[in-house]
Amino acid sequence: MTEHITSYYAATAHRQDARPALSGTATADVCVIGGGFTGVNAALELAERGVQVVLLEAAKIGFGASGRNGGQIVNGYSRDLDVIARRYGSTAGRAIGAMAREGGDIIRERVAQYAIACDLKPGGIFAAINHSQLRGLAHHVKTWSEFGYADGFELLDKTALQRHVKTQRYVGGLIDHKGGHLHPLNLVQGEAAAFESLGGVIYEDSEVTELKPGDMVTIKIAHGEVKAKTVLVCGNAYLKGVLPDLEARIMPVSSQVLATEPLGEDAAALLPSDMCVEDCNYILDYFRRTADNRILYGGGVVYGGQDPASVRSKILPLMHKTFPSLKDARIDFAWSGNFALTLTRFPQIGQLAPNVYFAHGDSGHGVTTTHLLARLLAEAVTGETQRFNVFAGLPYYPFPGGQALRVPLTLAGSWWYRARDWMGL
Ligand SMILES: Cc1cc2nc3c(=O)[nH]c(=O)nc-3n(C[C@H](O)[C@H](O)[C@H](O)COP(=O)(O)OP(=O)(O)OC[C@H]3O[C@@H](n4cnc5c(N)ncnc54)[C@H](O)[C@@H]3O)c2cc1C
């Protein structure tokens, strides 16, 4: 059995025991591959619509990015709404813009409907390191109000921001009151339990090795198989060697996270309003308080998805720069996880065959987007294709350089953006 990596989330997960692996043959209307937010929520959406679903997870529910991330509910996509409209045209831009807050709404609805205990807190802050970034945040508010989202935003100058984040590092920021944060592993586990409560079946330790297409697709694992009318591929950055053409559309990228010891009032003093924070750099820092008053601090990327030699030596200097008073804080957990980057920084959803669907590539902001894409998958499978088609119709581009050169070329591109951040442009 592949266990969760050691992390704050795994140590504080409500469910610790494993589900059985599949052995022999199972049948299903729909087979979902991958037990992260995308797969679990697509399965749950389908079960809510009365569809019979079997979900296969290679390790445990939430083993991938969904059980390791910063837990930040960030509305929208990894590109802003005006960029999307410029790039894809105003009709697609409007349609995509109309869904920009739906992922966050789905999370809050799920937590309420299924009473999921996942430390959900309201409010997320975007913190500006320079005045160019602060102007960018004002532009963000203007753009979103043009798309009909005038409520929920609060621009902050340096003094106002310091009431929420006790650091000298930022020149101002923006609160999104419709953002927030949570314990992502407990969320995805709660969603999985909700799926099972509706008759859904989950097999863990059941890595899919092959798909055989046909009217009934055969989905093979080491000691069994599922025969299903429809398959949803939701392995994201962790899907390896099953569908090479699909996997070539994305690049795994790792990001790293630390959690301090519980700091009691000291943590509350650093983040008094208990909102989560991410800065506006291209390679950004993100942090928040946990329910037991640790500071959970993430940042950095490794293109290609390898773990860095030391998570601590990568992230500690970032955390100490933001909060010098944490120099002596003990670090209880340090871990790494992979998200899937697309060249456009925009998620992809589509079909590999009439009965084989996929969704992946949230490009670092996936807590909300995965919930939206899961709903669109379920809509399409049950015959409501309109919203699915909006996303599925967008062009995608392979990474230049193919498998061999995509990492160095992306790294070279990122240096330009890092230099811009450094120069305050
Ligand atoms: C360190 C880190 C911090 C992040 N912080 C944030 C944040 O604060 N806010 C935010 O919005 N986004 C954040 N993200 C991004 C977000 O976590 C992801 O976009 C999202 O969780 C992706 O969900 P998913 O279900 O598509 O993929 P995953 O959660 O990676 O799930 C894929 C699952 O598929 C399984 N799988 C793969 N191959 C197979 C197979 N062959 N057979 C069976 N199962 C298979 C894997 O084991 C895995 O469990 C972060 C990501 C990382 C890595």
Image (cartoon, helix red, strand yellow):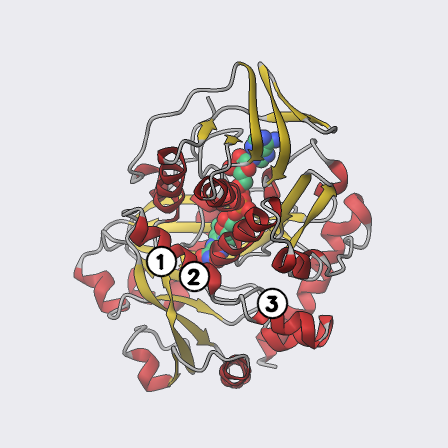
Which of the labelled discs sits on residue 108, or is there none? Answer: 1
Q: Quadrant of residue 296?
A: bottom left
Q: Quadrant of residue 84?
A: bottom right
Indicate whether 400 appears above or below 163: above
> Would you name the residue on which mark 2 appears?
104
Residue 252 spot, x, y in % from top left? 63, 46
Q: What is the total number of numbered labels drawn onto the structure image? A: 3
- The disc, 1 or 3, on the residue closer to the chain's N-terminal end is 3
Callout 3: SS: helix
Residue kind at label 2, given as amino acid type: Gly
Closer to us: 106 or 360:
106
Q: Residue at x 62, y 48 (%)?
A: 383
Q: Is residue 33 left or right of residue 199?
A: right
Indicate whether 243 appears above or below 311: above
| Rendered-image quadrant of the C terminus | bottom right
Residue kind at label 3, given as amino acid type: Ile
